Image (cartoon, rainbow, N blue to C red):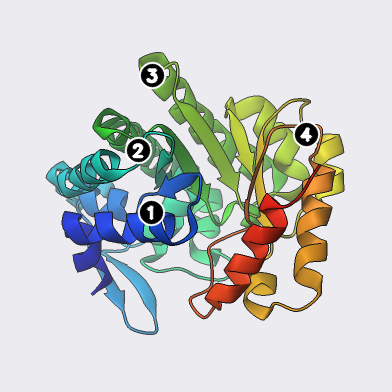
C-alpha cells in the first residue's frame, strides 16, 4: 500500500528520483505524505482504497493525551532524504515538506478529509482552547520534523496548507498565519539559509497578509489565483511558485501553451518557479508534460 511505499526508503527514494531522470526538473520533491506528523504523534494512519486517508482515534472524540508519541516514525523519512540527496545531481534542489498545522488538524480532528472541514471548523469555534492545544502540538512536532529533513539533506522545505481556503479571515489569521509564522521563525533560528515555501491553497485575497506575516521566503499559488493580480498584490520581489492548472495539463489542447505563457509573462518582474497549482493528476499523459516543459523552456522572456 501507499504507506508501505513511503516507509520503504529505497522505494521512496526511487519514486522521488524518477521524475528527475525522466524530465530533468530543477527540483526533486520528497515522496511522502502530510499525515506523517499525526502518525508520529500516535494516531493510527490507514489509506483505504477509493476513500483516502483515515486517522484514529479522531480528536473530535478523544483528547491529545490519549496519543502515545512515536517520533521514531520520522526516521525512515530522513533515510529517504539522505538516499535521494546522495544520488541527486548537486545542481538539483531537494525539497522536503510537511503539512501546515491547520490542514493536518482537519484530518486529526475529523479522522478523515472532507470538502468543507465542517467538523474541525466547528470545534475551533466551539472549543478554541482545546483546538489551540492541537495546533500547538502539531506546530512543535512539525518544526522538529522539518529540521530533521534539513539535517538529512533537504535544501528547501514547503508547508502545504491544502485546506487554508476553508477559513474566515479572522480564523485564517489564528489557525493558518500564526502557526506557520511560528514554524518559519523556529526553523530560521536554527537554519538561517534554508528556503521555506508557504502554500496556503485557496487563500485568495488573504495571500498578501500570509506573505507579509508568516515570513516565508516564497509563496506557492494554486490555479484559482489570477497571476496578473498576484504579481501586483504580493510583496515586491517575493518569489512565487505555480500556478498552472493540473487539469489543463491532463486535458491538453491548444490552450496549454497559451496558459503557460500567460503565467510566465505575468511574473516576468519577480523570481518565479514555474509549477502546477496543485499535484499532478495520475491520468496525465506524459506527452502533455513534455509539451508544457517545451513551452516553458523555450520561452524567451
Q: State left or right for residue 135 relative to residue 283.
A: left
Q: Earlier in the sequence, mark 1 or mark 4?
A: 1
Query: Residue 159: where, in percent of width, then height?
Result: 48, 42
Q: Nearer the viewer, mark 3 or mark 1?
A: 3
> Residue at (68%, 41%) from the top-left corner?
170
| Labelled pair 4, 2 in contact (Cβ < 8 Å) | no
Front-lying residue, 86 or 11: 86
- For disc 4, the marked residue is 234
Total numbered labels:
4
Alpha-carbon distance for marks 1 and 2?
10 Å
Q: Earlier in the sequence, mark 1 or mark 2?
A: 1
Determine if residue 150 is in view: yes
Q: Which mark is residue 142?
A: 2
- For disc 1, the marked residue is 34
- For disc 3, the marked residue is 191
| Labelled pair 3, 1 in contact (Cβ < 8 Å) | no
Front-lying residue, 136 or 100: 100
Amino acid at each position: 500500500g501507499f504507506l508501505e511505499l513511503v516507509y520503504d526508503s529505497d522505494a521512496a527514494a526511487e519514486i522521488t528520483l524518477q521524475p528527475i531522470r525522466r524530465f530533468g526538473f530543477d527540483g526533486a520533491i520528497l515522496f511522502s505524505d502530510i499525515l506523517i506528523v499525526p502518525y508520529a504523534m500516535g494516531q493510527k494512519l490507514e489509506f483505504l482504497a477509493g476513500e483516502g486517508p483515515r486517522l484514529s482515534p479522531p480528536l473530535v472524540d478523544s483528547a491529545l493525551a490519549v496519543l502515545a508519541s512515536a517520533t521514531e516514525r520520522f526516521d525512515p523519512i530522513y533515510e529517504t532524504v539522505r538516499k535521494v540527496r546522495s544520488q541527486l545531481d548537486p545542481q538539483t534542489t531537494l525539497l522536503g515538506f510537511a503539512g501546515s498545522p491547520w490542514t493536518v488538524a482537519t484530518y486529526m480532528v475529523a479522522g478523515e478529509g472532507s470538502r468543507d472541514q465542517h467538523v474541525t471548523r466547528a470545534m475551533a469555534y466551539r472549543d478554541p482552547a482545546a483546538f489551540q492545544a492541537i495546533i500547538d502540538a502539531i506546530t512543535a512536532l512539525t518544526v522538529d520534523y522539518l529540521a530533521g529533513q534539513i539535517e538529512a539533506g533537504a535544501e528547501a522545505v514547503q508547508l502545504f496548507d491544502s485546506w487554508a481556503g476553508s477559513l474566515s479571515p479572522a480564523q485564517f489569521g489564528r489557525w493558518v498565519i500564526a502557526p506557520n509564522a511560528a514554524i518559519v521563525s523556529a526553523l530560521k533560528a536554527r537554519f538561517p539559509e534554508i528556503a521555506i515555501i508557504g502554500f496556503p491553497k485557496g487563500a485568495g485575497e488573504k495571500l498578501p497578509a500570509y506573505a507579509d506575516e508568516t515570513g516565508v521566503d516564497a509563496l506557492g499559488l494554486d490555479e484559482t489565483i489570477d497571476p496578473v493580480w498576484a504579481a501586483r498584490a504580493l510583496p515586491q520581489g517575493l518569489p512565487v511558485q505555480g500556478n498552472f492548472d493540473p487539469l489543463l495539463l491532463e486535458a491538453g489542447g491548444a490552450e496549454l501553451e497559451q496558459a503557460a505563457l500567460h503565467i510566465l509573462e505575468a511574473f516576468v518582474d519577480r523570481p518565479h518557479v514555474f509549477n502546477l497549482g496543485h499535484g499532478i493528476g495520475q491520468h496525465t499523459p506524459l506527452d502533455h508534460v513534455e509539451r508544457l516543459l517545451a513551452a516553458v523552456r523555450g520561452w524567451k522572456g
